[in-house]
């Protein structure tokens, strides 16, 4: 379920204070003087080495501010060895590997204590042992992972939802989630999340897509033009989830047309239309060995492993690979030729069943990428009550009932076109 947490909510304020009191009691909070650059866009302090030409690389339009004030500090340096040991014992803790390697290098250099309060801020959660200070926003915000579970007041709810299976975060904030947050949890005596995954950026030109940089694209308008499922497919299948994606509408259109309109949509249309034409719309009984069962089985195994490691591109490739192999089967077996020879009726039945069942199995694997279209696909295959979420076990080959009545389908995917000015 979704739980949108505001850091101004009383439940969150109570959790922040409880966390800080625990860490303070452990002796890992102390007072000192802080001097450094502060980026208002990131709401984070920056080292001089983080700046490019004196500005934050993620917020180039605004100059960072130099701050000097008395702060409370978290003794992060005390947790470097613990984190290194945890990373080595649990290589899956931070993924993908490029993000893990970045944080391992940071840990091996040695950690510095960090400021966790502000005196000059006009808002924030009050530091429970200092009436003149508020908790630094990044320290505060990380705690919403446990305040959302009911901690520290609802033990049953906390035990149900914590530790988290996955924190999914942008690659620019993996240091907060992969270093500071687990150190905070350790200091407070709480379990660490099982995995932190730092996804890449969607870039536009040389910069990441950003409202502040003027490179943002309104997703609602984009969905109205191309359809949400086509956009989701492009974003998930074009680049690995841990890497950056260079956004381009020409690539979106090309991939959607190749994989969806020409690939899956064409396969569904040809398969069902041939069942309607040659078998009066009745899904035939397959009596001989399947040409697609082993292919679907292997693709499903690869898909499951890819999804487990959040390699969405690889998972997409395994799923669409079923479609590609089924389209090859059409060309290799030429069902229209088999239909002319009554002696090969059983062979035709096997091919037609293989094609329809491959469409159904692919729809299960493609469900997370294109939920509405895959529901529509299963309805085309006679599952008129296809409203629930299928499970990966439903991709097992042979679950399409023989004898089901199908109708000639409407096109599942229309070909996308670029505006003339972009196509030139």
Image (cartoon, rainbow, N blue to C red):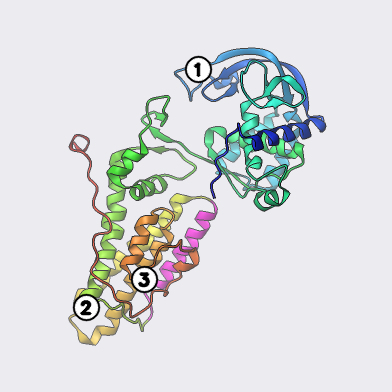
| Position in image of residue 288 (x %, y %) | 36, 83
Q: Residue placed farthest to the bottom in the image?
A: 343
Tell me the residue at 41%/68% (across/down).
Answer: 295
Secondary structure state at the residue bearing disc 2: helix
Quadrant of the frame with the C terminus: top left
Tell me the residue at 23%/41% (across/down).
Answer: 418
> How far is the residue under mark 3 from the one under mark 1?
56 Å
Secondary structure state at the residue bearing disc 3: helix
Residue 296: say if magenta. Answer: yes
Q: Is residue 416 left or right of residue 103?
A: left
Q: List the residue tagged with mark 3.
A: 357
Which image quarter: residue 186? top right
| Position in image of residue 384 (x %, y %) | 35, 68
Which image quarter: residue 110? top right
Residue 103 to residue 37: above or below: below
Residue 307 seen anywhere in this rendered image of the structure: yes
Q: List the residue tagged with mark 2.
A: 278
Which of the two discs, 2 and 3, labels the residue nearer the N terminus?
2
Q: List the residue tagged with mark 1.
A: 55
Neighbourhood count class around disc 2 (C-alpha, 10 Å): few under 14, some 14–19, many 20 upward: some
Residue 104 seen anywhere in this rendered image of the structure: no
Which of the two discs, 2 and 1, labels the residue nearer the N terminus?
1
């Amino acid at each position: 379920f979704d739980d949108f947490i505001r850091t101004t909510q009383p439940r969150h304020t109570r959790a922040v204070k409880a966390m800080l009191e625990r860490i303070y009691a452990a002796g890992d909070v102390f007072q000192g003087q802080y001097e450094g650059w502060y980026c208002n866009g990131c709401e984070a302090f920056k080292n001089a080495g983080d700046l490019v030409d004196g500005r934050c690389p993620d917020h180039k339009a605004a100059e960072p501010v130099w701050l000097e004030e008395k702060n409370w500090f978290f003794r992060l340096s005390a947790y470097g060895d613990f984190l290194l040991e945890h990373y080595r014992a649990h290589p899956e803790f931070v993924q993908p590997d490029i993000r893990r390697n970045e944080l391992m290098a940071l840990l091996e250099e040695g950690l510095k204590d960090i400021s966790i309060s502000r005196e000059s801020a006009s808002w924030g959660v009050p530091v429970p042992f200092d009436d003149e200070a508020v908790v630094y926003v990044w320290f505060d915000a990380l705690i919403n992972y446990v305040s959302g579970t009911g901690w520290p007041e609802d033990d049953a709810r906390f035990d149900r939802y914590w530790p988290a299976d996955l924190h999914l975060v942008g690659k620019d904030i993996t240091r907060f989630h992969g270093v500071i947050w687990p150190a905070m949890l350790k200091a407070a005596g709480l379990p660490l999340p099982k995995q932190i995954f730092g996804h890449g950026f969607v870039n536009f030109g040389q910069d990441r897509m950003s409202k502040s940089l003027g490179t943002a694209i309104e997703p609602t308008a984009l969905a109205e033009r191309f359809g949400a499922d086509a956009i989701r497919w492009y974003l998930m299948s074009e680049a690995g989830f841990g890497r950056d994606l260079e956004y381009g509408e020409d690539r979106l259109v090309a991939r959607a047309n190749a994989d969806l309109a020409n690939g899956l949509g064409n396969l569904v249309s040809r398969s069902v239309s041939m069942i309607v034409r040659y078998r009066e719309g009745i899904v035939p009984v397959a009596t001989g060995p399947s040409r697609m069962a082993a292919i679907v089985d292997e693709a499903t195994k690869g898909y499951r492993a890819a999804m487990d490691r959040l390699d969405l591109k690889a998972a997409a490739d395994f799923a669409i690979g079923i479609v590609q192999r089924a389209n090859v089967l059409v060309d290799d077996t030429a069902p229209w030729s088999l239909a002319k020879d009554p002696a090969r009726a059983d062979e035709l039945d096997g091919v037609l069943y293989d094609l329809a069942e491959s469409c159904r199995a692919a729809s299960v694997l493609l469900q997370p990428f294109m939920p509405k279209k895959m529901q529509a696909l299963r309805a085309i295959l006679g599952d008129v009550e296809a409203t629930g979420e299928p499970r990966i076990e439903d991709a097992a080959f042979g679950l399409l009932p023989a004898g089901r009545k199908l109708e000639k389908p409407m096109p599942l995917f229309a070909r996308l076109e670029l505006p003339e000015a972009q196509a030139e």
